[in-house]
Amino acid sequence: MSLSNYKIHGFLYLGFINQYKEIINPIAMTVTIVHVEVKTEYIEDFIRATSINHQLSLKEPGNLRFDVLQKEDNPAQFALYEAYENETAAVAHKETPHYLTWRETVSPWMAKPREGVKYNGLLPEF
């Protein structure tokens, strides 16, 4: 693309954004991706316990999404994708009985401590 085309497209894009700026939500959801590595002998137990936590987490006020992912080439590695409307809802999740039970139950099954990485979720907008 030539520089002149880029400028034209850039201006068109800015015009598009300005036209629809009232529907653009500047507030991001709170997302945490938790990386977990489980001892091999506890993979199935971890999945069962996490399934219960998943199902109950979806019912929490402010929960937008709670995905459980298993790494394709290493079934002992998981990622939990947790999206909440705001930080207050994310913090409240960690105080629920099902989360506290899950944390206590799966802790001895970890090959190493789990790691939660926080993100501001921009899209999709909920």
Image (cartoon, rainbow, N blue to C red):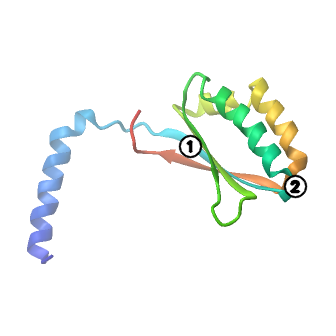
Q: Position of residue 42 (x, y in %)?
A: 85, 50
Q: Is residue 30 above or below residue 98?
A: below
Q: Residue at x 70, y 64 (%)?
A: 74
For badge 1, the amino acid type reads Val
Q: Position of residue 28 (x, y in %)?
A: 45, 39
Which circle marks residue 80 in the picture? none
Q: Secondary structure at mark 2?
A: helix
Asked if residue 11 lies left or right of residue 74, the reply is left
Q: Is residue 46 above or below residue 53?
A: below
Rendering quarter of residue 57: top right
Q: Residue at x 59, y 34 (%)?
A: 87
For badge 2, the amino acid type reads Glu
Q: Position of residue 63 (x, y in %)?
A: 56, 29
Residue that numbered label 1 is attached to: 31
- Looking at the figure, which quarter contains the C terminus? top left
Tag count: 2
- Looking at the figure, which quarter contains the N terminus? bottom left
Give the Cα distance between marks 1 and 2.
Answer: 29 Å
Q: Is residue 1 above or below residue 84?
A: below
Residue that numbered label 2 is attached to: 41
Q: Pointer 1 and pointer 2: residues touching (CB < 8 Å)?
A: no
Q: Position of residue 86 (x, y in %)?
A: 54, 32
